[in-house]
Amino acid sequence: MAESRHSVFRQFAASDWNGFLKGVEKEGLRVDRNGFIAQTPHPEVLGSALTHPSITTDYSESLLELITPVCSSTPAMLESLRNTHRFVQQNLGDEVFWPASMPCELDGDASIPIADYGTSNVGRLKHVYRQGLAVRYGRMMQSIAGAHYNLSLPDSFWEKWQGALGDQQSMKDFKSDQYFWLIRNFRRRSWLLMLLFGASPALDASFVAGVRHDLSRFDDRSWFGKQATSLRMGDLGYHNNAQSSLNICFNKLGTYTQTLDRAIHTKWPAYEAIGTRRDGEFIQINTSILQIENEYYSAVRPKRTARSGEKPIQALDARGVEYVEVRCLDLDPFSPVGVNEAQVDFLDLFLLDCLLSESPQIDDAECRVLDDSFKDVVAKGRDQELTLCRDGEPTLIGEAAQAVLRQLEPLAEMLDSWNGGDVYRKALLAQRGILSGDNQVPSARVIDSMRASGLGHRDWAMEMALGHQNTLRQEGMEAGVQAAFMAASKDSLAEQKQIEASDTLEFGDFLEQYLRS
């Protein structure tokens, strides 16, 4: 019998281990003092949303996205994220930064301004893509916010790991295969993250005005899922009926990029009926199932930093997988920066174990079981009688969750012995406390906090937002850090103008060229 991957890893020495490389992209709405989505443009003091390295917008002009650089430790990453939050909070004026994944008060699609990236062709392309999302799905679901966690392992690890496994592939192909090995196991276990970190069980009534749903009334302005962990990841959140026919395959890089490429080049009748222009203006990039790869909604993505003008799947095909992006994380509304240290350290442990555990390819039958488990935990994960299919047998969710945590214990102990601390054991202990009832899963904590405050979702989240704003403004920033942010804003605005001035093609010709590439 071949030696297990965990056994191979245990033969590493402390000197063989250089830790993780990590970063986070954290979204959040700008909101006025009445708890309504901001109608103001992206603040100029925050720089250009097109070119700023750490402050941009996601779908909406009001939906900020704060991005850390790649960091080698959790404290460094969280400090970077906190500094960006401090700078943003100093420059929001009377507005606040919404802490919840489900949005503030809305008034239909028209109240959600689509992000503007200026007059350059690349800026207009980003805007037209968002127009396409609006005509395809409406803007409401695009007002939801989350945190994306990016993780990779350093080249030094991959060289040692390839040698230990006796693999003879090119490093590019080896790393891609290994990242997809991790992704397959992530898909098998991602339900656990929805239990441990799902934090969007309630929403403002304006989000579901005129929409059929099965939520329960919290008060006259709020609805909630009695056993839900994450409305963001459920049927009311990110979903796409056209994509249900895609069968995107996560078994290996080749099948993943091929199935995505097919979706980008397969016309969809409903989108063809809409067309690409309305009154002479572009309203979507194309009429395919997907306009671009990023339109595909998934809990995890293999990623490669793309070069200027390069599409994501072209970058993946050319240079292989660089990192994985975990996309299913709700914002932690109790944290001023939307994520917390124990969560990040647990994710590192969880993802590394996904790489080290056996990971056969996923067939269609298993894929359906995994999708059902994920949906069940999203919709009713706080129901202790919920059962999941584990090793072919129905297992109570609590037992299934504890089994995964037990599996992580030896790895946590090994990493801590190498690092000379107790970081991973503490992260594991924090999650075990949540499951044992010493603490609460975040979704239950949100509902209990709302009830204790006597406030509905909008007013409760506003109270949290103001508290976080006060905390971060009072902390202030070091003068050098403040100056660096001011310089980055100024430089990004100048860079946007330079891009706009250098364009030579009409946008229609630019788009045609982009679609041909």
Image (spheres, rainbow, N blue to C red):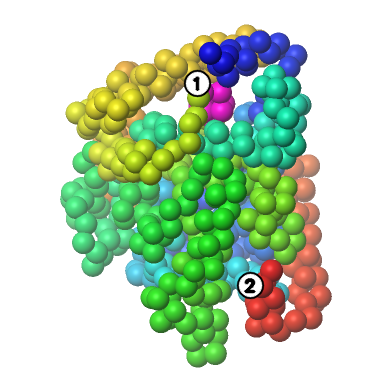
Q: In which quarter of the image is the C terminus?
A: bottom right
Task: Quickly name the residue at label 1.
Answer: 427
Give the answer, above or below, for where 315 lies relative to 497.
above
Q: Which of marks 2 and 1 is in front?
A: 2
Residue carrying label 2? 515
> Which amino acid does the dot numbered 1 rest on?
Ala
Residue name at image x 65 percent, y 43 percent: 321
Residue 323 is one of the magenta-drawn residues? no
Residue 37 image position (x, y, % from top left): 43, 62
Q: Which amino acid does label 2 sit on?
A: Leu
- Mark yes or no: residue 346 visible: no
**Of 336 and 288, the residue lying toward us:** 288
Q: Give the range drawn in magenta.
A: 350-357
Q: Is the magenta stretch mostly helix, strand or loop?
A: helix
Query: Eyeballing the image, is 202 above or below 348?
Result: below
**Side of 397 relative to 410 (left or right):** left
x, y percent for residue 40: 53, 68
Please tell me which of labels 2 and 1 falls first in the chain: 1
Question: Which residue is at the front of the view, 104 or 59?
Answer: 59
The image quadrant of residue 442 is top left
Q: Residue at x 66, y 73 (%)?
A: 516
In this view, 382 is above or below 247: above
